[in-house]
Image: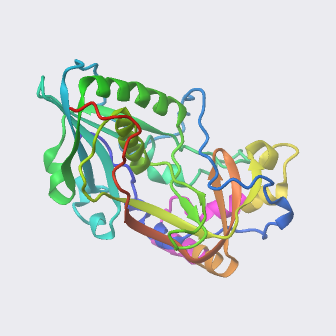
Amino acid sequence: MGAARCSRLLPLLPLLLLLLAPWGPRVSGALRWPRRRWPVPYRRFDYRPKTDPYCQARYTFCPTGSAIPVLKEEDVIEVYRLQAPVWEFKYGDLLGHLKIMHDAVGFKSSLTGKNYTMEWYELFQLGNCTFPHLRPGMDAPFWCNQGAACFYEGIDDAHWKANGTLVLVTTISGAMFNEMAQWVKYDNETGIYYETWTVQASPDKKSTVWFDSYECSKFILRTYQKLADLGAVFKKIQTNYTSIILFSGEPIYLGNETSIFGPQGNKTLAAAIRDFYNPFKPHQSVREFFVDLVKIIDHVILNHEFYLFYNLEYWFLPMKSPYLRIIYEEVPLPVGSKVSFGV
């Protein structure tokens, strides 16, 4: 198998029942963020910082990755939708029954006959993107939450077909592929942090979305949209994607690491955030896990509290029923803004 799966959820599956709640006091409404733009725009950066050696992955990120090649402009490239259950390479269709899926995109060159796979996922697995480490001697939670694109030669047909999807969605020119490659470079260098959660006001499809996730499926959707804008015409087929959604009232802005955990920070709030994340630490025993799980469920249901880390800032979510859902919903293939190249 070419690369590790996008949402490395299996070790977290019990935690997904969980849905989260913190320790600590409720947050005063006086701290509400004055700006009212929802969803909060995902922040982009000028460059990708080096990762801290403390951050380690069980599975190596993009082990067979390579640079995206420059194809001949007259080449005709088939574009494939790839989808398979998370951890399919290890557990088969287990998570497919829960519709917890990973997405990628495949390409096949007509001139060379070569196949390629492109995907986007966490550098240090999903757990590190969703929950921080509480390191001794450090007041602020420590995050290993970068995500990035991975490109490599070949399409593992057996992997994608066995329990998932491998289907042709459009055909593009080599020139369009090369333009897409330049966009991928920009997207990958500026969109560097993985965001697990979508947060919205209710299960109603028209409800307000407070925060949008930034993970593997969103990269694929951005890639499809870029190809459509370049002139690609997509087939009319149904395409569904997995989202993990938290439900809350209007979020309350708390501040960044410096304003909360710095020398002039809010020590009470800092302690509450650390206490919130503590039950999500790796567990050494089954008993320890269930003790923390009971605490998590108690707090999310009874106290309706959650602390979200987004754009390197902390927010308070006043949680409400049904607290968490994993959904698998249709997102149609895009229509571009340019006239088709007629490939």
Q: Which residues are magenta?
A: 273-295
Q: Whole-percent x and y of residue 52?
A: 56, 34
Tell whether position 286 is magenta: yes
Residue in the foreground of this view, choosing between 9 and 78: 78
**Quadrant for the C terminus in the image:** top left
Q: Is residue 189 left or right of residue 317?
A: left
Q: Whole-percent x and y of residue 187?
A: 47, 33
Q: Whole-percent x and y of residue 248?
A: 63, 70
Residue in the foreground of this view, choosing between 189 and 284: 189
Outermost residue, front direction? Answer: 339
Q: Residue at x 15, y 28 (%)?
A: 114
Q: Residue at x 30, y 41 (%)?
A: 3
Q: Whole-percent x and y of residue 34?
A: 81, 54
Is there any visible trace of residue 66 in the rendered image? no
Tell whether position 335 is magenta: no
**Quadrant for the N terminus in the image:** top left
Residue in the foreground of this view, choosing between 224 and 122: 224
Q: Quadrant of residue 201?
A: bottom right
